[in-house]
Amino acid sequence: MPRQACWQSIALVYNPALPDQPTHHMFSPDQLHTIEAQLARKTERTQLLEIDGRQIIVKQLEAPLQHWGYPVLNALACVLQQPMLRAVPAPGGKAAQAIEIARLRALAAAGVSVPEILHVTPAWFALSFLGAMSVDQLLRQQAGQAQHYWASGLQAILELHRLQQTASQCFARNMIWHEGKVSFIDFEDDPTSSMPLASAQARDWLLYLHSTAYILPMDAEQIAQDFLLHLQQDSSDVQDEVLRAARTFGWLRILPKQRKPWGRDVISAQAAAQVLYLAARQAGKKPARSH
Ligand SMILES: Nc1ncnc2c1ncn2[C@@H]1O[C@H](COP(=O)(O)OP(=O)(O)O)[C@@H](O)[C@H]1O
Ligand SMILES: [Mg+2]
């Protein structure tokens, strides 16, 4: 990992310029008792609870994870010269909770709209509830306004990057509609621990496109145009990296477009690749491969 990226991620967590970390112990013993009783009633790891009239999200520890695919991904990233493909370690368990809390603090300090941390215990932490609708749900349920919501997501990514930050898993389901704008959730890993900030930001654009292009009721040329309009306001490093990926992966548009029998992974890759191909073309750079 380049030294600069390494220092950037350390600075995010241990910036001495930040005020002392708040302790995040908002709830009284009675309220804690109520929360724990409610958590015990259901098996879901993340739950929406109501405590004294306030809605909160409680995220419990996940089992520690092990990923055998890391070397494969890292080799692929190297061969294809796409640093953004590098595996981002997602440790699960206590380590994941510590990363998520540190990232939420750092993002909030940088001015990004993320949930507020209300309370932290060794087994769970509580966050402010941002709202019930993710961008994914809005695109599916309000097709008439899909372009508006989609562009709001693009704008949110741009603003996140202008604050020199990156999401963790920039999928539409991790982007929540909050007070007329898009906020980000779900920070159990830190991409800048395994790649430079610009690569992590390029990855944000691609993950967002990958999680939305196949849902959008818009033609691919229009999607590419909106995508480029926002991407071209990001830093030139990020633009270059996204367009390089577009030229590497644009040929995947030859994948099937039918959901049956291929499934969501295939059609989402096909739709994203189609848009990337058109975006690279609109940007005036011919894709390297033309199948
Ligand atoms: N602060 C929040 N406000 C609103 N909804 C949230 C919030 N945090 C989590 N959620 C909801 O809970 C789901 C799971 O939370 P998330 O942080 O994405 O965890 P996971 O690691 O399980 O994907 C999200 O998809 C979203 O629907
Ligand atoms: Mg999630």
Image (cartoon, grey):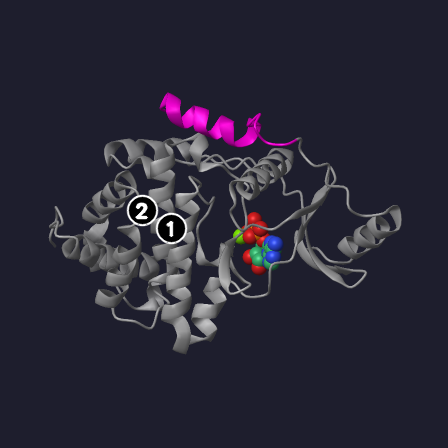
Tag 1 residue: 158
User: Between residues 260 and 269, which one lies in front from this camera angle?
Assistant: 269
Q: Earlier in the sequence, mark 1 or mark 2?
A: 1
Q: Which residue appears at 55% of the width and 41% of the height?
A: 188
Q: CA distance from mark 1 to mark 2?
A: 6 Å
Q: Is residue 154 left or right of residue 277?
A: right
Left or right relative to 87: residue 97: right
Q: Element under label 1?
A: helix
Write the residue at 33% across / 44% down: 202
**View extreme (top): residue:** 3
Q: Residue 178 at x, y = what percent?
A: 55, 61
Q: Quadrant of the N terminus?
A: top left
x, y percent for residue 253: 22, 58
Is the residue marked 2 within 8 Å of ligand 2, measured from its CB?
no
Visible in this render: residue 255? no
| Range of magenta residues | 1-19
> Whereabouts is ligand 1, in terms of quadrant?
bottom right
- Report the residue marked by disc 2: 234
Callout 2: SS? loop
